[in-house]
Every structure is written in structure tokens, then in C-alpha cells.
């Protein structure tokens, strides 16, 4: 993971926890209307992929236990991890691309509603992503994956040679010479692994995305509704298809790229289809970026524009993230796929404790405040969710009191201590296990290993009946909180 060159180390310390009556009087622990939903408190656990599903993309017992553990903490909202809307093999990523997933998802919704005593509203994040392949062995790439073109033949002056000799010649070139013969895209496919983009409109399925995505998202949302979820979060953030449509790097010339007005069209058409499929009683919102943090990408001015269009179209909430792009990802090792949280944009998405002068805490607050001001100035009251390095009650309450955001998202802090919400609400804040922002969890995510937190995953390993990771070395769930009176 990329780290700011300043390498300043920060420690997350909170010593200003409220007592029970202060918590009861706070905005954080007061109700809020989010479209058709009433939240009992203004807290939110953003989507986090924990790699608890299986190759079939099903709700497993591990998935149920994972979300049950969060539900015991009774946050206002839990957003279930990014869940694939297509019925295609996607490794152990949770899926919602067919009706056969509904019974498992229904169990998940029932589990969370029950374990939270009906206090937590449950959303599911719907994701679409394009093909990405592992970085190939250079020889394999040149022998098998590369399509030999007239351009290669011309560059090598091998116009009439058999294809095998062209490949053999390419293999014999030093890297510099090879780079000059391959196109920019071919060189990148060899160095990073093949990756589709929304601008690859020569590929029919990509050209047709504006026609296919609304139906795919709408059917997935309808399944979530049938399964008993309270709503869906459309994943328009980070490195995935919908964010790529919004990106300033989207240069499609079919009316769905170029200007902001055109880039926002597919996301709006997806939203309309989802709303039509689910009706007004089902919460529908999206997660998108306050800034892509990449060269030539969308920035805050774009985000303000998109927020306005989404709110105006009737979305029930807007959740803001930052960065997390493939564009500046590190080159993966041979045999590995690029991971969109390894560059500067990845750092802005999940800031770690080794940071710059600004530090890792609350880096998204200013941008979200600016977006909120823009909406409120236009008379739009859509609630905004902020996340990124927020761990303490005081900071959370200040954000709400000063009108910087409407709902507080705690992702890694909730992973470090799923009981944060109940502890703070009941005056036991001093017992909170505060996240270190070490990004140990994110490292596990990168390797598609079961995600756990270093602050609890080696604790009480001999506890009878606890679930352990595949290697048997880590517990999969945070120990239960033994409430003090
Ligand atoms: C293990 C892990 C998995 C994540 N998976 C998702 C995801 O599925 N969808 C998403 O929008 N963000 C995902 N994120 C990003 C978080 O939702 C959140 O935006 C980020 O961690 C910053 O918030 P925090 O500082 O409160 O952790 C993930 C983060 C972690 C640590
Ligand atoms: S491993 Fe735990 S302490 Fe480290 S960032 Fe993740 S949640 Fe926080």
C-alpha cells in the first residue's frame, strides 16, 4: 500500500466518551429519516468485503455469523459488502445475480434484524465490475495472449513471416525494444494484466453496457427487496463499472462519456430502473467518490454536480468515499491481479496511520461538507454519509452538529470493535477497542483472505466452539463484549 512520503505516524486516541445521558442527548444517537426508513441512530457501517462467501457466491454460515456479530452492536445501518449483480463466477464474492440467491439472502436479512433487536436497518451494496486478469508471465503473454497484428509485423519488418517467428522475435527483444513494438494497451496488459475499461467500446458487451446495466441492477435490487432488505446501495465508487462511467477519464463517444452531463447518464438510468422495480417504500441510494484522486480524474466539482443530479432524481441517501482506483495501482507480482488500493488513491480511500501533515483522520469531511452545502443551497435535503478515519464520539458528534454530514460511517472502527455503537450509547465508551488504522485487515482483503482485525484475531483462541480461519491461526469473529453494569 502506498504511503505519504512524509511518513508521519499517528495514534488514534479517544478519551472524551460521553456518559449515558450525554449520548442520549446527542445528535449521533438521535433518529433520522432516510427516504422511507427511520434510523434509530445516525451511524452506519459501510460495505466491507470480509471474504466469507464461497465459490458459488452464496450466503454461508460464516457470512451469517459475520453480520450477526455487527448487528449485536446495533448501528443505525449496516451495508452488506459489495455483492455481484451478474450470475457469473466471481471467486468467493457474494452474489445476487439469480433468484436462487434469494433464500440465503433472506436468512441474512432475518439474522441481522433479529440480532439487532429490530434496531438496525439493512442495505446491500450492488456492484458491477469489468473483467480483470492476473499479470501474466511475459513469455506466456507473447506466446499465447498477444494477438499478432500488422503493426507488430511492420515494426519488426517481418511482414510475410509465419506467426511463430514473429512471436519468437518478440520474445528475443529487450524490454525497451519490446515496449516500442507493442501498443500502450498491449504493454500494459503484459505489465499489469489485461483489464477491461468502459471505453473499450469495440467489445460488444461493453458498447452495450448502457442498455444492459439498468436491467441487471433492477433485477438484483428486486431480489434484495424480496429477501427482506430495507434497501440497496448502488456501488458507484472506487474502481468498478459505474464509477468508471462517472470518471472524467470516460471518453466514450456514444452519449455516455465526455461531459459530466453524459457521464452521469448511465448511473441515473440505473437508478431509475431500480426505483421502478422496487417502488417508493424501498431505500435506494448510492456510494460515489468525492474525488477520484487520480490524474485527469473527476474531482470535487464533479462530485458536487453528480450529488445534485442524484438527489434531484430522488435517491434516498448519498454515501461518499474517496479514491480507490486501478489507474494508479501498483504493478502486481506475476500471477496476481492489480488491486485498486495500492496507490495514492487507495491511500485516500483507506488512510493508514503512517500519513502526512493532515493525518489519516477525517480526510473526507471537508469534501462532504462542500457537497452538502451545494445540495442544501439548492433546497435538496438528501442525507449524506461520511466515512474515512472516524473513530471517536466527539469527532462524529461535531460533524453532525456543524452540519458537515448527516450520518457517520465507521468501517474499520466497526471491524475493530463491532460493539462501538452499544458501548458508546450506554456510556461504556472507555471500553471501546480503538482502530489503529494499521490496514492489516485491508492486506488480508487484498489477498482475498478471510478479513479479521489484528486487535482481536489472536485473542482467546482456545475459547470453545469459536470459528477459526482456514489456517487455524485466527478467530473469525470479535470476542463477545461482556457488559459491565
Ligand atoms: C476489508 C475492507 C473491505 C472493504 N470493502 C468495501 C466494499 O465492499 N465496498 C465499499 O464501498 N468499500 C469497501 N471498503 C471501504 C470502506 O467501506 C471504507 O470506505 C474505508 O475503509 C474508509 O472508512 P474507515 O476509515 O471508516 O475504515 C472496504 C474496506 C475494508 C477495510
Ligand atoms: S486490522 Fe483492525 S486495527 Fe488495523 S486497520 Fe483493520 S480494523 Fe483497524
Image (spheres, grey):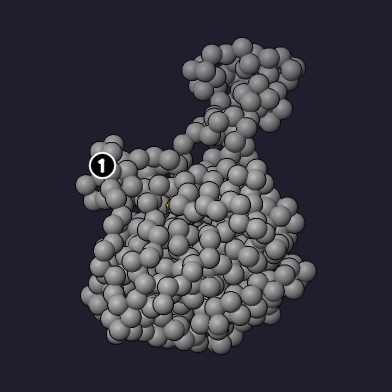
Query: Where 184 falls versus 297 (above or below)?
Result: above
Left or right relative to 99: residue 218? left
Residue 354 appears in the picture as rendered:
yes
The residue identified by callout 1 is 8
Please provide percent x and percent y for residue 20: 33, 80
Q: Quadrant of residue 126?
A: bottom right
Please provide percent x and percent y for residue 164: 74, 17
Residue 150 appears in the picture as rendered:
no
Which SS class for mark 1? strand
Name the residue located 53 percent from the left edge and 60 percent from the top edge: 478
- Of residues 395 and 293, the one drawn nearer to the viewer in this rendering: 395
- Of residues 313 and 474, the one drawn nearer to the viewer in this rendering: 474
Q: Residue furthest right?
A: 100
Name the residue located 65 percent from the left edge and 78 percent from the top edge: 110
Question: Does any atom of ligand 2 lie closer than 8 Å to the CB of label 1?
Answer: no
Left or right relative to 15: residue 307? right
Location of the N terminus (image quadrant): top left
Amino acid at each position: 500500500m502506498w504511503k505519504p512520503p512524509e511518513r508521519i505516524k499517528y495514534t488514534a486516541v479517544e478519551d472524551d466518551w460521553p456518559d449515558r445521558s450525554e449520548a442520549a442527548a446527542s445528535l449521533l444517537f438521535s433518529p433520522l429519516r432516510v427516504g422511507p426508513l427511520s434510523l434509530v441512530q445516525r451511524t452506519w457501517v459501510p460495505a466491507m468485503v470480509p471474504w466469507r462467501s464461497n465459490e458459488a457466491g452464496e450466503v454461508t454460515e460464516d457470512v451469517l455469523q459475520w453480520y450477526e456479530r455487527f448487528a449485536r452492536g446495533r448501528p443505525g445501518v449496516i451495508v452488506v459488502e459489495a455483492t455481484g449483480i451478474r450470475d457469473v463466477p466471481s471467486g468467493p464474492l457474494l452474489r445476487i445475480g439469480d433468484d436462487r440467491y434469494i433464500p440465503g439472502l433472506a436468512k441474512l436479512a432475518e439474522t441481522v434484524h433479529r440480532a439487532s433487536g429490530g434496531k438496525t436497518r439493512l442495505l446491500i451494496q450492488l456492484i458491477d465490475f469489468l473483467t480483470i486478469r492476473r499479470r501474466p508471465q511475459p513469455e506466456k503473454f507473447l506466446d499465447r495472449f498477444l494477438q499478432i497484428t500488422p503493426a507488430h509485423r511492420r515494426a519488426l519488418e517481418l511482414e510475410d513471416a509465419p506467426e511463430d517467428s514473429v512471436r519468437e522475435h518478440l520474445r528475443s527483444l529487450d524490454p525497451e525494444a519490446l515496449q516500442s513494438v507493442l501498443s500502450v494497451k498491449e504493454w500494459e496488459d503484459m505489465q499489469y494484466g489485461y483489464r477491461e475499461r468502459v471505453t473499450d467500446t469495440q467489445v460488444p458487451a461493453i458498447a452495450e453496457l448502457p442498455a444492459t446495466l439498468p436491467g441487471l441492477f433492477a433485477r438484483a435490487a428486486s431480489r434484495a427487496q424480496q429477501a427482506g432488505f430495507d434497501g440497496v446501495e448502488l456501488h458507484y465508487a472506487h474502481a468498478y463499472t459505474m464509477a468508471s462511467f462517472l470518471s472524467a477519464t470516460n471518453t466514450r463517444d456514444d452519449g455516455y462519456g465526455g461531459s459530466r452531463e453524459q457521464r452521469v447518464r448511465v448511473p441515473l438510468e440505473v437508478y431509475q430502473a431500480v426505483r421502478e422495480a422496487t417502488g417508493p417504500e424501498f431505500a435506494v441510494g448510492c456510494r460515489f467518490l468525492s474525488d477520484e484522486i487520480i490524474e485527469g480524474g473527476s474531482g470535487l466539482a464533479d462530485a458536487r454536480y453528480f450529488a445534485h443530479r442524484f438527489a434531484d432524481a430522488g435517491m434516498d441517501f448519498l454515501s461518499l468515499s474517496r479514491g480507490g482506483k486501478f489507474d494508479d495501482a501498483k504493478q502486481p507480482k506475476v500471477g496476481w491481479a492489480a488491486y485498486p488500493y495500492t496507490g495514492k488513491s487507495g491511500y485516500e480511500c483507506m488512510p493508514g496511520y503512517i500519513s502526512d501533515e493532515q493525518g489519516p483522520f477525517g480526510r473526507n469531511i471537508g469534501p462532504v461538507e462542500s457537497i452538502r452545502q451545494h445540495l442544501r443551497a439548492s433546497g435538496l435535503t438528501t442525507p449524506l454519509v461520511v466515512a474515512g478515519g472516524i473513530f471517536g464520539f466527539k469527532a462524529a458528534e461535531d460533524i453532525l452538529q456543524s452540519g458537515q454530514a448527516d450520518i457517520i460511517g465507521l468501517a474499520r472502527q466497526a471491524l475493530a470493535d463491532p460493539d462501538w455503537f452499544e458501548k458508546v450509547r450506554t456510556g461504556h465508551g472507555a471500553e471501546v477497542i480503538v482502530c489503529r488504522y494499521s490496514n492489516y485487515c485491508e492486506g488480508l482483503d487484498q489477498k482475498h483472505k478471510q478479513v479479521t482485525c489484528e486487535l482481536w484475531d489472536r485473542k482467546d483462541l482456545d475459547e470453545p466452539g469459536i470459528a477459526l480461519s482456514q489456517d487455524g491461526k485466527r478467530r473469525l469473529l470479535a470476542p463477545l463484549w461482556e457488559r459491565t453494569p
